[in-house]
Image (spheres, coloured by chain):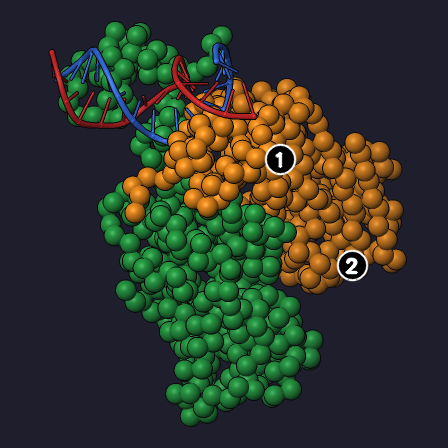
Chain colours: A green, B orange, C blue, D red
DNA sequence: TTGTACGCGTTATCAC
DNA sequence: GTGATAACGCGTACAA
């Protein structure tokens, strides 16, 4: 048994050609005689040769590896077990299809400096995908100064103005959700906001504020509660809002909405009869809750796929950085908002 | 701006030593004069040097990268959004702590041959973690013949007898769950089994069968339904069991249990009054369901962490392959089984 | 169309 | 203790 795997030289010898020719065949270089190519290919197949990626990376400066960073925003990865797995799935689909491998970095909460240090020095990645970064993350600046392409799955925070990103129109989607509640005749429409260090959370609150300001009721800060993307936050926040006599709530995600629903029901009130609720994300749980949740559906998997496609295009020089993609959302009307007739509102924006 | 990053040679020149000495410092080689080491370290720090991992890998044959394969068992990754993220978290914790990176391979359902081919030829991994493999996976044989350490998070299927694995005592845990139901006076205890291509699913059914055979009621195949680790399977299976007049069900996981609960309630029956239900996994949802689910808790994160630790030990030659770890489970008694007094049964096994 | 020869950045094996 | 120098396996000008 051979100590080390076959290399180009071995194949060249067995095929009776030079190492360079084998290399050309392996890399589909055009100007190789068909007959030679076929022969070499056959030898490679027979002997079971695989190129050594480390050696290739050393000379080409490319690894066909992209990194994905999952920051541990406490609540998210543990509680909302939908968003990140789905995102990862979209990312993996795209990397698979284009022959890249995916290096997964799940932030180490116990030692973030060491974690980010390792990540930044780990120069075996052709590009990087950042998902759901807190705008207060202390390592943002270092990440932004990386010499490789970076795309964000979020509207970019500071330092990232020149980078590409893919997002959804959080402001617009929130406005549509709130306007929907208003159109149903609700008079005290509150919101349970998400994490205000998160761009999505910030923009969804902004959408609520704009919609209320434009309404005949105006914006009332007492109708804002919550502050984290968690069921617990929705539960606690809803209890506070109950004292304000609200009759409708726009929750910044479905976890929050589910927590709010629990608080409503525990208070002996009925949803949607007494209080309407609209969520965001369209988790699997949104459909099976009682009542079924009206919610803004966002295409999470496509978000991952689109970001990855942009990244790979930049890596391969097929496109420049600084591109922005805004994916469409859709208001899925079920029972919790109290709309008599189910309908759907779609908004698209390039 | 420099075209390419600094290398050992550059640092050596700036520090007035040879490349070899810098390398020794970087790798903490013992016999370097303290003064020289300090000086070199300072230059490295000042100039911001990072070793080139590809070059290092080329000569050491080691990459400090481990691969994790997530097979797309249809139901699992999409529906049970708890198991894999939690497992990944345990894995990432361990790789982070020991300075490894994690290459994530989510099986491409649309092109599995190409996917596994790429994976197997991708020789940039020092070891591999296989999670939840179907025993019918056609690529098992190829994976088992890999020359690098492999650990399984599951009892091994064929081809893997010599590999290490970490699992739980599924048979024993299922037996305890069933015996618990019997001890509560239930007379027709059924089971909703999981995927029978999955080692966990197989063993949990086996545990049920043994417990029933040992009981005064004996084993009755008509009391077995289901067949997939999904809510849908639990729902459908429970409807079938209802016709058999069962008064208790052991579900092979919590998704199944939740589906079963829905079927029971839709049939106008009460849980636990009319029908007891016990699940498996202790998902977050198990605690918040109504009634709260009695279930077998398994340490998922620890499963990932333990498997990773074993793998890294093998990679680093700290231990041999073929080790087996069986992690303890715990029966968490809540409301759905109908036990009057909450209690806990723990089982540990080395 | 094919072969020769060099360089990519490290580690490791020698001498000194 | 430290410094040359030979691999490691590959891609690619340049020559032929």
| Image quadrant assignment for residue B182 | top right
Q: Disc 2 and disc 1: Cα gap in Å?
A: 35 Å
Give the residue at x 44% y 54%. Answer: A142
User: Is residue A282 shown to the viewer in this render?
Assistant: no
Check disc 2 and report the residue beneath it. Answer: B335
Give the residue at x 57% y 72%. Answer: A227
Label 1: how many Cα within 10 Å (few below 14, some 14–19, many 20+): many
Label 2: how many Cα within 10 Å (few below 14, some 14–19, many 20+): many
Give the residue at x 47% y 9%. Answer: A2
Residue A123 % position (x, y): 42, 40
Front of the two marks 2 and 1: 1
> Helix, strand, or loop for circle 1?
helix
- Exactly how many numbered labels are in the figure? 2
- The quarter of the image holding the C terminus of chain B is top right
Residue B211 % position (x, y): 80, 36
Taking A242 as reference, is B176 left or right?
right
Q: Which numbered circle lies on residue B106?
A: none
Taking B343 as reference, is A137 left or right?
left
Check disc 1 and report the residue beneath it. Answer: B308
Q: Is residue A167 above or below residue A4?
A: below
Instruction: Judge by depth and name the residue closer to the eye, B21 or B69.
Output: B21
Labels 2 and 1 within one chain: yes
Residue A307 % position (x, y): 36, 53
* N-terminal-most mark, 2 or 1: 1
Residue A318 % position (x, y): 24, 46
Chain for numbered disc 2: B
């Amino acid at each position: 048994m051979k100590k080390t795997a076959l290399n180009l030289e071995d194949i060249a010898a067995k095929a009776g050609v030079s190492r360079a020719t084998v290399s050309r065949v392996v890399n589909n270089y055009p100007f190789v005689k068909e007959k030679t190519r076929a022969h070499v290919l056959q030898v490679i197949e027979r002997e079971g040769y695989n190129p050594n990626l480390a050696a290739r990376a050393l000379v080409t400066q490319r690894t066909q590896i992209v990194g994905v960073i999952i920051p541990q925003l406490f609540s998210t990865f543990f509680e909302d077990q939908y968003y990140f797995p789905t995102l990862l799935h979209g990312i993996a689909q795209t990397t698979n299809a284009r022959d890249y491998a995916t290096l997964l970095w799940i932030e180490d909460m116990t030692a973030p400096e060491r974690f980010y240090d390792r990540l930044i020095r780990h120069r075996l990645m052709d590009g990087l995908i950042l998902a759901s970064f807190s705008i207060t993350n202390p390592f943002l600046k270092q990440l932004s100064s990386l010499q490789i392409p970076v795309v964000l799955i979020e509207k970019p925070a500071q330092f990232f103005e020149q980078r590409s990103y893919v997002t959804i129109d959080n402001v617009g989607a929130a406005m549509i959700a709130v306007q929907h509640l208003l159109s149903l005749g609700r008079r005290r429409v509150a919101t349970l906001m998400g994490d205000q260090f998160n761009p999505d959370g910030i923009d969804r609150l902004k959408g609520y504020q704009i919609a209320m300001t434009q309404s005949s009721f105006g914006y009332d800060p007492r109708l804002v509660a919550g502050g984290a993307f968690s069921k617990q936050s929705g539960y606690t926040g809803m209890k506070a809002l109950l004292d304000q006599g609200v009759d409708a709530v726009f929750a910044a995600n479905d976890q929050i909405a589910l927590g709010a629903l629990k608080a409503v029901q525990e208070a002996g009130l009925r949803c949607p009869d007494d209080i309407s609720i609209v969520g965001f994300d369209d988790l699997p749980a949104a459909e099976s809750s009682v009542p079924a949740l009206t919610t803004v559906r966002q295409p999470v998997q496509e978000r991952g796929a689109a970001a990855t496609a942009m990244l790979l295009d930049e890596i391969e020089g097929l496109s420049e950085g600084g591109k922005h993609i805004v994916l469409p959302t859709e208001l899925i009307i079920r029972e919790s908002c109290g709309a008599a007739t189910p309908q759907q509102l779609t908004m698209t924006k390039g």
